[in-house]
Amino acid sequence: MEKYQALAQSIVNYVGGEENVLSLTHCITRLRFKLKDESAAATKEIEALDGVMTVVQSGGQYQVVIGDEVENVYAAILAISNIQGSQTENVEAEDEGKKRSLLDRFIDLVSSIFTPILSVLVATGMIKGFTALLISLQLVAADSGTGRMLGIIGDAFFYFLPIFLGLSAARKFGMSEFTGMATGAALVYPALPAIMGGTPLYTLFADSVFASPVYMEFLGLPVILMNYASSVIPIILALYFGAKIEKTIGRIVPAMLKNFLTPFLTLLILIPLTFLLIGPVATWAGQLVGAAATAIYAFNPLLAGLFIGGFWQFFVIFGLHWGLVPIMINNISVLGYDPVVMAHFAASFAQVGVVLAIILRTQDKKLKALSIPACISGLFGVTEPCIYGVTLPRKKFFILSCIGGAVGGGILTALGARFYLLGGLGIFGYPNFIDVHTQELSGMHTALIASGAAFFTGLALALLAYRRLAADEKPNDEPAAELPLGGLAAPLTGKIVPLTEVPDAVFASECMGKGVAIEPAEGRVIAPAAGMVTTIFPTGHAVGLTLDDGRELLIHVGMDTVQLEGKYFKAHVEQGDKVSAGQLLIEFEPDKIRAAGFKTITPVIITNTGNYQAVTATEENTVSFNDLLLTTI
């Protein structure tokens, strides 16, 4: 890190100092600053720095092109300054959010807040589930030391969930993390249950569904105390407004007093506001959502299960499942169980059944080698390898897995199964169905039946439908075996565009390396040869490869598409993955990207051009996956 600190400090100084930086993010090659005053930046001095290729001012961003080391320089800037990466992401998200639908913004919000805590949430849920199983089987007594210790381990995270959400929500909204955690801690303050156990002063909204006893007042205003342990909606909504309060205070308070006066005033305003208004309203809203979900279930449990179970994997692909996860958590918090969204449980077993059928029938060694670990992963509830690596490229098998998921979901809801916990996935998810209050096991038995039905439905349908056709065995994207010496196949299909005509000075000047650009005709990027993924940006818009023959390749889909923050992109590989020729790297939606106002022209560059005497591009006007694109000498 030390080798980048001098460069990082110089860049910060030359862009006008920290006080001139509104936000900072980075893409695969460049730092992207938003500056208060771009004229205050010393562009010539920055371009003269060793380690900087050039500077581009475009789209309201001051872009410092670094190249492959951009992530290290970005990290160094965060380390030596008060510029916060989380704030950067928030500003970018706010700007982009204005262009996105309400549903897209909601899904992004929920996934961003829950993703950082998801692993520990699942882990503690598994502990709660297995504890309930041990107590049900009378292997452990609930009041024994072992039972109590397991209860502490499993319950603590869920009880103090508002504190953890306070951290992740503060990051999402660009708020001080510890102020967010302090707000969450206030909601689970230990003395609150004792206060609520006393005699109420009076009752608000008496004789209505919102009847609320008042146990205390604040400055003469009634405080409606509620149980916020394990709650989700109140803390998220509180910090949404808290971030705005904090930013407003930050603009008013003198700079020398900000460090302590900003959190002081923010907490003094936000926490009473949360108890007086935000918390009760959010809790009532959560109760209404839970009631609505239960009403849908009551209208027709079977249809609800068929719908959730059948479409769950579509929801996962498009990220829509994040819109249902809060409903499930809210139902468990409000009702003590979830009777609706839990219908997704069987979908992973249907996916495993389909993949097992492919393993049994396929003669393709590569496909079998890919399917076996994907099948094992699916048993533990992680179905992405099954979906993206096996069934989705062979669309009919993906559809068959959805049918199996619908069968399992329908059985779960028709037989009245319920999620009492949000715990393990796959085979570790069965304890989620144990009633933690009565230790009743019938729900788990139903889950075993439903998951078995989903598995065997997927397996049977796939075995019946399987045909050993080339179209089913592989996507048929492997580059042609016969290429001239030094030849490289095209990673995309489309129209050839000279690199000098790319509407970006960095690529057009060839300072990143020589190559060619492609205006894509379809939304897939494949590996043109065997190698390793050296860089894959989280937004999925660009990938760097080091091929087995030593060539280093950068494929950058579109211009400024990093600003889409992953929307319309899906990466199928991770950094460090070994890839083979023809393997799918990225999927994207070119029409939607263009409709959003971004160009899709895609540079394909040999970034270590200096190692070769010449890099020449094909003379053809268009290319497909099997065609020669570049030749290195």
Image (cartoon, helix red, strand yellow):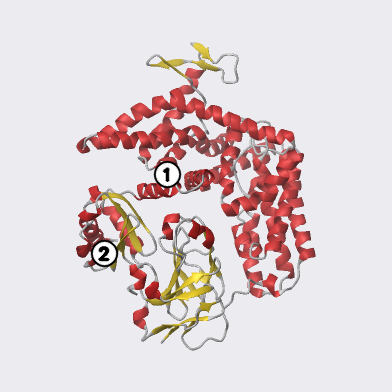
**Dot 1: within a 10 Å radius of its alpha carbon, few (fewer than 14), some, or many (20 or more) residues?**
many
Q: Measuring from the top left, give residue 284's x and y in whole percent.
A: 55, 27
Sequence order check, earlier mark of 2 and 1: 2
Q: Residue 513's image quarter?
A: bottom left
The residue positioned 52% from the left and 62% from the top of the image is 590
Picture quarter with the N terminus: bottom left
Q: Measuring from the top left, give residue 77's x and y in whole percent.
A: 28, 55
Q: Is residue 194 above or below residue 360?
A: above
The residue positioned 53% from the left and 36% from the top of the image is 158
Q: Relative to 89, is 422 on the left or the right?
A: right
Q: Is residue 284 above or below residue 6?
A: above
Picture quarter with the C terminus: bottom left
Q: Write down the residue under mark 1.
A: 172
Q: Residue 250's image quarter?
A: top left
Q: Is residue 18 visible?
A: yes
Q: Nearer the viewer, residue 231 or 248?
A: 248
Q: Secondary structure at mark 2?
A: helix
Q: Relative to 164, is 337 on the left or the right?
A: right
Q: CA distance from mark 2 to mark 1?
A: 31 Å
Q: Write down the residue under mark 2.
A: 3
Q: Amino acid at mark 2?
A: Lys
Label pair 2/1, CB-CB below 8 angstroms: no
Q: Is residue 447 visible?
A: no
Numbered circles on residues, count: 2
Q: Residue furthest bottom?
A: 485
The residue positioned 76% from the left and 40% from the top of the image is 414
Q: Measuring from the top left, give residue 525's x and y in whole percent.
A: 52, 69
Q: Secondary structure at mark 1?
A: helix
Q: Amino acid at mark 1?
A: Lys
